[in-house]
């Protein structure tokens, strides 16, 4: 028998993982843009 509290927590894990992934992806994009700006400023 499946524990309902366990199965009801899975969507929360997925939401948390999704938000973390989105944060990392946006941070990665930010790093790329910052590197472009630094390179452009130096040249």
Image: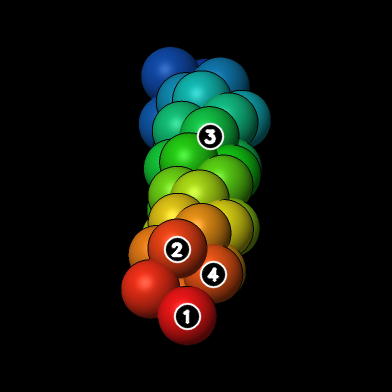
Residue at the (48%, 41%) spot, across then down: 23
Of residues 40 and 3, the one nearer the viewer is 40
* Residue holding disc 4: 40
Q: Where is residue 43 in the image (x, y as percent from the top left)?
A: 47, 80
Instruction: Quickly name the residue at label 3.
Output: 19
Judge depth for marks 4 and 3 and give the one in front: 4
Looking at the image, is mark 2 or mark 3 nearer the viewer? 2
Marks 2 and 4 sit apart, C-alpha to C-alpha, by 4 Å
Mark 3: secondary structure: helix
**Tag 1 and tag 2, C-beta contact below 8 Å:** yes
Along the line of sight, the residue nearer the viewer: 3 or 33? 33
- Rounded to the nearest angstrom, the CA distance separating label 4 from label 3 is 31 Å
Question: Residue 38: x percent and y percent?
Answer: 40, 65
Pointer 3 and pointer 1: residues touching (CB < 8 Å)? no
Circle 4 packing at 10 Å, graded few (<14), some (14-19), many (20+), is: few
* Depicted 1 relative to depicted 36: above or below: above
What residue did someone put label 2 on?
41
* Residue that mark 1 sits on: 43
């Amino acid at each position: 028998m499946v524990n309902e509290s366990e199965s009801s927590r899975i969507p929360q894990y997925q939401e948390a993982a999704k938000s973390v992934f989105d944060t990392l992806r946006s941070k990665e994009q930010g790093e790329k843009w910052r590197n472009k700006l630094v390179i452009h400023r130096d040249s």
